[in-house]
Image (cartoon, rainbow, N blue to C red):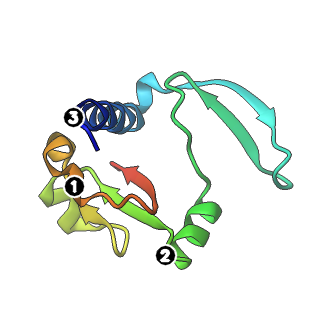
Amino acid sequence: MNHKSLSLLLLLLAAAIVGACNSAESKKQSVAASSQGEGQIDTAYADGIPRITIRDFEELLNKNEVFVVDTRNQAAFDQGHIKGAKLIPMNEVAARINEFPKDKKIVTYCS
């Protein structure tokens, strides 16, 4: 991967993490009925970053198709975290981008 592509990937990943962790700025803009399943709601967020349901997350986790990143600090991680999550604090993401797999969906969380 060339330098420009890697830089763009890092920028997009950092923006996704910051957007996901700033829920006050990521309020719902609109809600529409989903065609994917009964009772599910697709929500559009101002930041444009996709969210997944807990059920979808559990399915991906059970199939080993997801890489879970906890972007909080060590103290918060030690108090409890999703089993199998990797601690990569938000301010370290760019420096540790090589730890992210290319063959799995990446799910970040911060609370």
Spatial CA span between label 1 and label 3: 13 Å
Disc ID at residue 76: none
At label 3, counting other C-alpha atoms closer than 10 Å, the crowd grade (few under 14, some 14-19, many 20 or more) is few
> In this rendering, would 52 be left or right of 38?
left
At label 1, counting other C-alpha atoms closer than 10 Å, the crowd grade (few under 14, some 14-19, many 20 or more) is few
| For residue 24, above or below residue 54 | above
At label 2, counting other C-alpha atoms closer than 10 Å, the crowd grade (few under 14, some 14-19, many 20 or more) is few
User: What amino acid is labelled 2 in the image?
Assistant: Asn
- Label 3 element class: helix
> In this rendering, would 56 be left or right of 47?
right
Spatial CA span between label 2 and label 3: 30 Å
Q: Position of residue 32 (x, y in %)?
A: 79, 32
Q: Position of residue 28 (x, y in %)?
A: 60, 27
Residue at x 13% of width, y 45% of height: 95
Q: Position of residue 107 (x, y in %)?
A: 43, 54
User: What amino acid is labelled 1 in the image?
Assistant: Asn
Residue at x 27% of width, y 37% of height: 10
The residue that disc 2 covers is 64
- Label 2 element class: loop
Judge depth for marks 1 and 3 and give the one in front. 3
The residue that disc 3 covers is 3
- Label 1 element class: helix
Spatial CA span between label 1 and label 2: 19 Å
